Amino acid sequence: MTALGLLYPGHSAEDDYPRIEQLLGSDVRVDVVHTDIGEDAHRVDALREMGAEGRLAAGVAQLRLAGADAVMWACTSGSFVYGWEGAQQQVRALAAAAGMPASSTSFAFVRAARELGVRRVAVGATYPDDVAALFADFLRAAGLEVTGVRSSGIVTAAEVGTWGEEEVLTLARSADAEGVEAVLLPDTALHTAAHLSLLEKALSKPVLTANQVTVWEGLRLADRRVNAPALGVLFTREPIVQV
């Protein structure tokens, strides 16, 4: 059994994770511990507070008791808002507190893009423009070429969590453009697990979403590969371990 420990801020789209666990169809357990979100606002100061070391450390003890093999800060904006160096320090502190490998959703996007061998990406963000721009800066710091950013201007995770298939597909299509190798949808408050096959079929290219890459990165940290085509092309990469 491989156990992934996820620190998830508040309550928005955490039901994506049991769905992903089911779609993995193997001996993988995804444990979610909710952290205190503080103020629910896609605003730089609020996001930095949400990702503060003390808030993350508060959930670590529960994950250790659950027997997690790796821990993920399952939040994109609450990691990239610190910048490339700051997000690395955040992960180092989390790993030290947890005593196990750690990463965050922001780094998961970078590593997933590298896994797929894509460099030219477009971003479809639920965030306001200034926050979405910080994600693009983070990706560029990792060596990715961000061809465009489409922002939706949504301030709260609670509102993002109400979006369904139609809104998610519209966002992905609006971000896509000629020459783009993959479209990234960076918000763990956005329900996407049920829509990945539809998204990739509609765009005819990989679509990387926050909750999807979070679990994939956790599996990578735990040295696991699982073949699960319903979770997108990212989960069909070799070498495959299928239980």
Image (spheres, grey):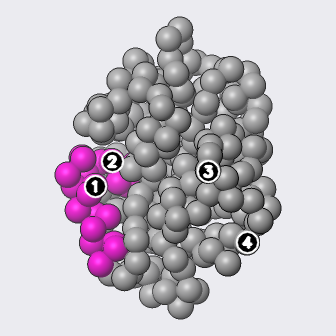
Relative to 33, 241 lies left or right: right
Point out the tag, 1 or 2, that comes first from the N-terminus: 2
Task: Quickly name the residue at label 4.
Answer: 27
Residue at left 34%, top 73%?
95
State yes or no: discs 1 and 2 in contact (Cβ < 8 Å): yes
Label at residue 239: 3
Point out the tag, 3 or 1, that comes first from the N-terminus: 1
Residue 149 percent coordinates (x, y): 42, 23
**In the displayed structure, would residue 91 be above or below residue 120?**
below
| Residue 166 in view, yes or no | no
Point out the tag, 1 or 4, that comes first from the N-terminus: 4
| Secondary element at image label 4 | loop
How far apart marks 3 and 1 lie (CA) works out to 29 Å
The span picked out in magenta is 77-96
- Label 3 packing within 10 angstroms: few (<14), some (14-19), many (20+): few
Residue at left 76%, top 35%?
197
Q: In which quarter of the image is residue 89?
A: bottom left
State yes or no: discs 3 and 1 in contact (Cβ < 8 Å): no
| Secondary element at image label 2 | helix
Which marked residue is nearer to the observer: mark 4 or mark 2? 4
| Secondary element at image label 3 | loop
Query: Majority secondary structure of the magenta segment?
Result: helix
Task: Quickly name the residue at label 1.
Answer: 87
Q: In which quarter of the image is residue 232?
A: top right
Asked whether residue 88 is drawn in magenta, I would say: yes
State yes or no: discs 1 and 4 in contact (Cβ < 8 Å): no
Task: Quickly name the residue at label 2.
Answer: 80
Which marked residue is nearer to the observer: mark 4 or mark 3? 3
Relative to 89, 186 lies left or right: right
Point out the tag, 4 or 2, that comes first from the N-terminus: 4
How far apart marks 4 and 3 lie (CA) works out to 17 Å
